[in-house]
């Protein structure tokens, strides 16, 4: 599913126009990005949490030359799926109810 398809689903489920749903999605994503970029954690109960983690500096290898290279430390965004999300993804599929 891409962003346009997601906006269509949001619009259909919430009785919003596609334009309003698009603005709502953009505002939500922007708020999550801004919060995580400033070092905060965003927790959506049942869905998951967005946070940052630190990756230490390390030595890597140039695959072309085999030469050792230094890889700088970095701050990375992380997502941890919540229990409700995990349960929905792991639910049995294709079983018919009797």
Image (cartoon, grey):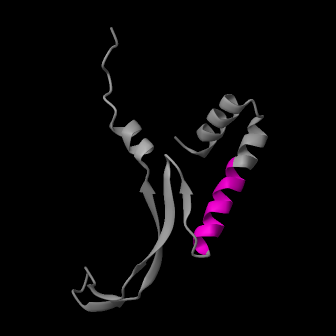
List x then y, in percent, for residue 33. 61, 65
List x then y, in percent, for residue 63. 25, 79
Name the one closer to the observer, 97 or 58: 97
Prevailing SS of the magenta stretch: helix
Q: Residue at x 68, y 29 (%)?
A: 12
List x then y, in percent, for residue 67. 24, 91
* Residue farthest left in this picture: 66
Q: Which residues are the magenta region? A: 25-37
In this view, 67 is above or below 88: below
Q: Residue at x 30, y 19 (%)?
A: 95
List x then y, in percent, for residue 64. 26, 81
Q: How many marks?
A: 0
Q: Residue at x 21, y 86 (%)?
A: 66
- 18 relative to 95 in the view: left or right: right
Name the one closer to the observer, 41 or 60: 41
In this view, 72 is above or below 52: below
- 31 relative to 58 in the view: left or right: right
In this view, 15 is above or below 76: above
Assess whether residue 29 is covered by the magenta stretch: yes
Quadrant in the rendering for residue 70: bottom left
- 67 relative to 77 in the view: left or right: left
Q: Residue at x 32, y 22 (%)?
A: 94
In this view, 43 is above or below 2: below
- 76 relative to 58 in the view: left or right: right
Assess whether residue 1 is covered by the magenta stretch: no
* Residue farthest top in this picture: 98
Q: Quadrant of the C terminus?
A: top left
């Amino acid at each position: 599913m891409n962003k346009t398809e997601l906006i269509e689903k949001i619009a259909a489920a919430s009785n919003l126009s596609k334009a309003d749903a698009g603005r709502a999605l953009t505002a939500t994503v922007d708020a999550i990005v801004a919060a995580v970029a400033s070092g905060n954690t965003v927790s959506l109960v049942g869905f998951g949490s967005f946070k940052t983690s630190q990756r230490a500096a390390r030595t890597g290898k140039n695959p072309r030359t085999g030469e050792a290279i230094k890889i700088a430390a970095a701050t990375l965004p992380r997502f941890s799926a919540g229990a409700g999300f995990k349960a929905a993804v792991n639910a049995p599929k294709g079983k018919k109810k009797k």
